[in-house]
Image (cartoon, coloured by chain):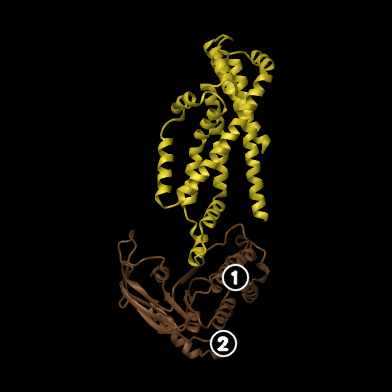
Chain colours: A yellow, B brown
Amino acid sequence: MLHNRIIQFLVLFISGLVFLSGIKWGFRLSDYVIPSLNDIITTAKNVYIPYSRDMLETIIIAIAGHMISICMACSIGIIGRLTHWIGDLIKAGAYHVQAYPVVAIAPIIFILFGDGLFPRLLITAMICYFPLLLTFVGIFTEPVENVEHFYKSTQMLNRILEIKIRAFEHLQKILTVIEGSATLAMVGTIVAEFLSAESGIGYRISIALSQSDMAKVLVALFMIGLSTALYLTFLEKIGSTIQKRLSKS
Amino acid sequence: MISINCNNISFSYGHKPSILFDGISFTYNGPGFHSLFGESGVGKSTMAKIISGMIVPHKGGIDCQKVTNIMYSTNQERFPGWQTIASHYNSVLPVHKHDLWKSMMSDFGIDHCHHSRFDQLSLGQQNRVNLIRYLLQDEPVLIMDESLANVDEHMREKIILLIKNQFPEKCFIYISHHVREVCKFCDQIVVLRHPKKKPQVISMKGQNIRDETSLDLSTLQKNMLDLVHAT
């Protein structure tokens, strides 16, 4: 599982480097625009300690934001399952909020809350929660007739049981969307750091951009890819453990 | 006495241009093992769902006496995936019925399935474990829509006799394509026919045997011929 993810990432990263080298060679660009492999390795040796620290901070915020968005989406999915007006209101509100690009709303968040931890967490959660919300709303509002029928006939079906049945029947779908939204959480955190922060790998990229230092950007991208691969592997491992336990118990 | 009166029922599915039921009426009287019979596509399951209140007919209605809730079981149902058969029964049946489900599983030939999950069972075993949980409810009427499908003939007949003897106060409406079984075990047989045939419903009497010794082969053969002609 882990080695597959890392191999996939390395193949992608090396392909990117080859593509850049191709552009450099094709347009006869200087090392200043696209650095040589030696420059990238030298830069990596120089910056890997502060970049690793920032990467760790970014991944922690991404995971925290991801967990918050899972809880938010699950809660709204459960409330949205209700047929009365509160459920409809929450569902409509959630959809309307998502109609705005989060990047466009981000400046308001930074103006109100500054550039600390909270706005980064909020933006991360907002970016990755919409696919989660759609999945949870879909799952919790879709009856599993062939399981629920007996409970309805015997009037034993309560809300908790209904949610349990629907969540269990769509467990694979839930785990897949959680894994899929993990990459969005990482994107959200980096975007937030890029826009306005004083630490984190997104901040490092914004500095590298202002210095036109592509070697630093590539080192940061390598760390982001590696961290995302590790996080996705961790989520896949949790998912497969849950499924194994449920099938054994 | 239990009675289920279907009065002037009319119904059609929105996506189909033709009418499925055009003002049909029939009655099941008293407890016992009755049948709703007919060819595939005549609307047996739809009628069963109308009787159980899952579908509302466009016209007409169901009048019941001494019945508050009509249960409908099919061979499409599943147990929750996180429970074994035993844990599911224990969660949906009252404590005083826990010994009963164990003895019924034994009688139904599935006593070795206690600790299996539903999806680990064969189709015939799944249908039997599903039927047991319905039989042990307190409701007086149960519609069995192909509830014994994929069960071998010998076991099916054994189960029907067990049900008739163990629950004589209940009313069962058995939906099956087995002519011999319906004629042999059922009391009232309501035959549903294609909407173009008039009348769309014919009521007949089955032999309604309670043990194998009371079977009259010549009557059974006559009933089977009548039933086949009626469809």
In what element is the residue under mark 2? Answer: loop
In the image, residue A181 sits, relative to residue A150, either above or below, namely above
User: Residue B72, position in %: x, y?
Assistant: 47, 69
> Residue drawn 66% across and 67% down?
B114
Please name the residue that numbered disc 1 is placed on: B94
Please, what secondary structure does the residue beneath circle 1 have?
loop
The residue under label 2 is B211
Q: Mark 1 belongs to which amino acid? A: Pro
Q: Can I make out residue A188 in this image? A: yes
Mark 2 neighbour density, 10 Å: few (under 14) some (14–19) many (20 or more): few
Which quarter of the rendering shows the N terminus of chain A? top right
Is residue B57 positioned above or below A117 on the image? below
Task: Bin the neighbour count of mark 1 within 10 Å (Cα to Cα): few under 14, some 14-19, many 20 and up.
Answer: few
**In which quadrant is the C terminus of chain A drawn?**
bottom right
Of the numbered discs in the image, which one, if any, rests on residue A117? none
* Foreground: disc 1 or disc 2: 1
